[in-house]
């Protein structure tokens, strides 16, 4: 009888110890992955950085490589080409964790968030319903809807207007919140204009048809942000570079002298910021380029 009571008592001790260990482990995981900041209101979506951004830990190399390889091997329609994926991954290998701004949402959205583990990844997209759809599938996604007022077919007129206003509203270093340049996106959450972005990817909005918004405004805004917000430099990547709008606007605002690598569909520019950014010209050879056209 005493033996049975002793065994029963030991079982209760083991159960209690197991429960205590599980509770302690759960508390440890919760506090390390989702730290709380009592000084910020949960309703302040622009001021509060995601927990992964505050944690600031780089993704381990084997996990990084596996994610890139699986993404490249995927047969999903609409995915980015293998060479483009590896080019962007090389930038993250060098700069992550970092402050990463993406124009567009798509197949690679979960990959970009994962490769920039420990950094802050922000997405901008023109379709608020698609944002809501992805927010349900990807908890913690930081994405904002924006309105584009341009059409891809307007690109020649917009380029001409930007050249006329290059020392005014369309200058390369400015506060976009107060810009009247037709290219400028000035309705983003205000806090985003003050962030010194390390990497910017232009993979949106839609630009495949003449009636699509086109990426003139996204490329111009990326070029100004890269030059204006911080000391730089900023890696700016433009997808679908083989298309006319993406190529012409990149040459106009990101400049061939800043082109460091490219595939058929992706161009990689390294844009100087701070004291290295010129305030009156986007490109050093802009006068020569215009005279030749």
Image: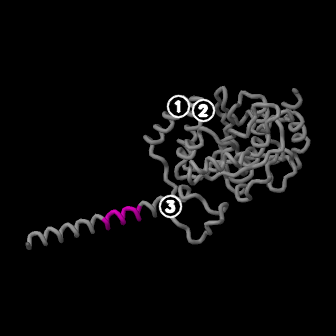
**Disc number at residue 74?**
1
Where residue 169 appears, x then y in whole percent?
87, 49
For the residues bearing labels 1 and 2, Cβ distance under 8 angstroms: yes
Mark 1–mark 2 distance (CA, rounded to whole Å): 8 Å
Give the residue number, with chain letter if any, for mark 3: 34
Badge 1 local density, few (<14 within 10 Å), some, or many (20+)?
A: few
Q: Is residue 264 positioned above or below 259 on the image?
A: above
Q: Quadrant of the C terminus?
A: top right
Q: Earlier in the sequence, mark 1 or mark 2?
A: 1
Judge whether residue 205 is colored magenta. no
Where residue 205 appears, x then y in whole percent?
73, 40
- The residue lying at 80 percent from left, 56 percent from top is 177
Q: Which residues are magenta?
A: 19-28
**Disc number at residue 79?**
2
For the residues bearing labels 1 and 3, Cβ distance under 8 angstroms: no
- The residue lying at 56 percent from left, 53 percent from top is 139
Where residue 221 appears, x then y in whole percent?
76, 46
The residue nearer to you, when weighing 117 against 137, is 137
User: Residue 270: which quarter of the image?
Assistant: top right
Q: Nearer the viewer, mark 1 or mark 3?
A: 1
The colour scheme used here is one colour
Q: Residue furthest front?
A: 1
Q: Is residue 53 positioned above or below 241 on the image?
A: below
Q: Secondary structure at mark 1?
A: loop
Mark 3–mark 2 distance (CA, rounded to whole Å): 31 Å
Judge whether residue 20 is colored magenta. yes
- The residue lying at 23 percent from left, 66 percent from top is 14
Q: How many marks?
A: 3
């Amino acid at each position: 009888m005493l033996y049975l009571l002793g065994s029963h008592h030991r079982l209760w001790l083991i159960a209690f110890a197991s429960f205590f260990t599980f509770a302690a482990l759960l508390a440890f995981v919760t506090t390390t992955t989702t730290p709380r900041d009592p000084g910020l209101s949960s309703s302040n979506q622009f001021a509060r950085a995601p927990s992964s951004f505050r944690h600031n830990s780089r993704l381990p190399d084997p996990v990084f490589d596996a994610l890139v390889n699986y993404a490249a091997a995927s047969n999903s329609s609409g995915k980015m080409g293998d060479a483009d994926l590896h080019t962007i991954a090389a930038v993250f290998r060098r700069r992550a964790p970092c402050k990463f701004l993406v124009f567009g949402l798509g197949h690679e959205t979960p990959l970009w968030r994962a490769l920039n583990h420990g950094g802050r990844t922000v997405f901008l997209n023109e379709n608020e319903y698609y944002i809501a759809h992805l927010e349900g599938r990807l908890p913690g996604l930081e994405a904002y809807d924006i309105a584009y007022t341009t059409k891809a077919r307007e690109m020649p007129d917009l380029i001409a207007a930007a050249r006329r206003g290059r020392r005014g509203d369309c200058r390369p270093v400015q506060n976009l919140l107060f810009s009247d340049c037709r290219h400028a996106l000035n309705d983003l959450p205000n806090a985003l204009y003050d962030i010194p972005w390390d990497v910017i990817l232009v993979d949106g909005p839609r630009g495949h048809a003449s009636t699509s918004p086109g990426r003139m405004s996204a490329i111009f805004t990326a070029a100004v942000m890269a030059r204006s917000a911080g000391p730089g430099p900023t890696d700016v990547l433009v997808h679908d570079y083989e298309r006319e709008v993406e190529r012409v606007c990149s040459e106009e605002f990101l400049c061939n002298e800043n082109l460091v690598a490219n595939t058929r569909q992706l161009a990689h520019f390294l844009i100087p910021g701070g004291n290295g950014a010129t305030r009156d010209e986007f490109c050093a050879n802009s006068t020569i380029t215009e005279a030749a056209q």
